[in-house]
Image: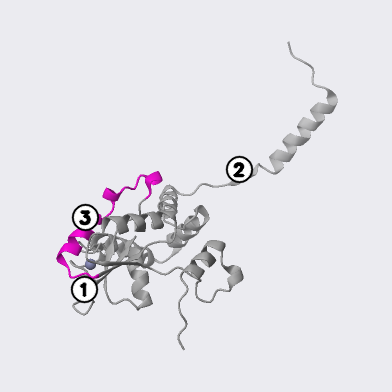
Amino acid sequence: MIFPVPRRARGVAARVAAAHSLHPPVAMAVTTLPPALAALCAALGELPGIGPRSAERIALFLAQAPPETGRRLAQAIVAARERVQVCRNCGALTETQPCGICADARRDPTCLCVVERPVDVLFLERAGSFRGRYHVLGGKLSPLSGVEPEDLRLAELEARLAREPVREVILALASDVEGDATCHYLAQRLGGRAVTLTRLAHGLPAGTALDLADEVTLHRALAGRQPLTP
Ligand SMILES: [Zn+2]
């Protein structure tokens, strides 16, 4: 059975149809990216700190830039991936084995700075105040994320302590729950050795007023206060 459509409803339907014929829906007006450009967007979107909008902006730039621009970028990515490796001794990023720091006889072999990630070595080197050597753990203990002691470069650290004249091990790990747990574990595991274990000081960041520091930072800054010498 066909129900009759009221006259008023027929008028509304006609107006809607007329409006659509003049102004098509927005979704119909959006064009899709060419497949190669979409693939480039997807690849860029996998990079840290690059969201979908940034990925699309970079992809569109590269697609319209001179061919050398894209070729240089592609070659730099391939070269970095092929040449950069992990130092077999300390775990830092390098193009040689061992890395420049491990091979540098002017570095203090008695002082070993333990860090979480290879990039931490770069940060400390940029500060320019440490003249010892490094050991990259490759992470920090995190039972919730499934990171156990055997997942870290701890056996390599113990092997170095056995063969190198290390007297002080500086634990330069993050000041968070996992960093604290890792330091505590290392203190227990390395406790019987003839090395001094130290940890980076916690306190106020340079140039920070007290009202900008959180309670934990203020607590640690107070606990780690230093005598003032004239
Ligand atoms: Zn090295």
Sequence-wise, the earlier of marks 3 and 2 is 2
Residue 46 in magenta stretch:
no
Locate residue 62: give its quadrant.
Answer: bottom left
Q: Residues within 10 Å of mark 3 (few under 14, many from 20)?
A: few
Badge 3 element: helix
| Near-viewer residue (79 or 192) | 192
Q: Answer with the quarter of the image where residue 1 lies.
A: top right
Q: Is residue 81 above or below residue 99?
A: above
Span colored in magenta: 142-167
Residue extending furthest bottom? Answer: 230
Q: Which residue is label 3 attached to?
A: 155
Mark 2, secondary structure of its residue: helix
- The amino acid type, in three-letter code, at marker 1 is Pro
Q: Whole-Å distance between the Cαs marked 3 and 1?
A: 19 Å
Q: Residues within 10 Å of mark 2 (few under 14, many from 20)?
A: few
Q: Earlier in the sequence, mark 3 or mark 1?
A: 1
> In the image shown, does 155 or 52 lie closer to the viewer?
155
Assign a secondary structure to mark 1: loop
Where is residue 208 drawn, in percent x and y?
55, 74
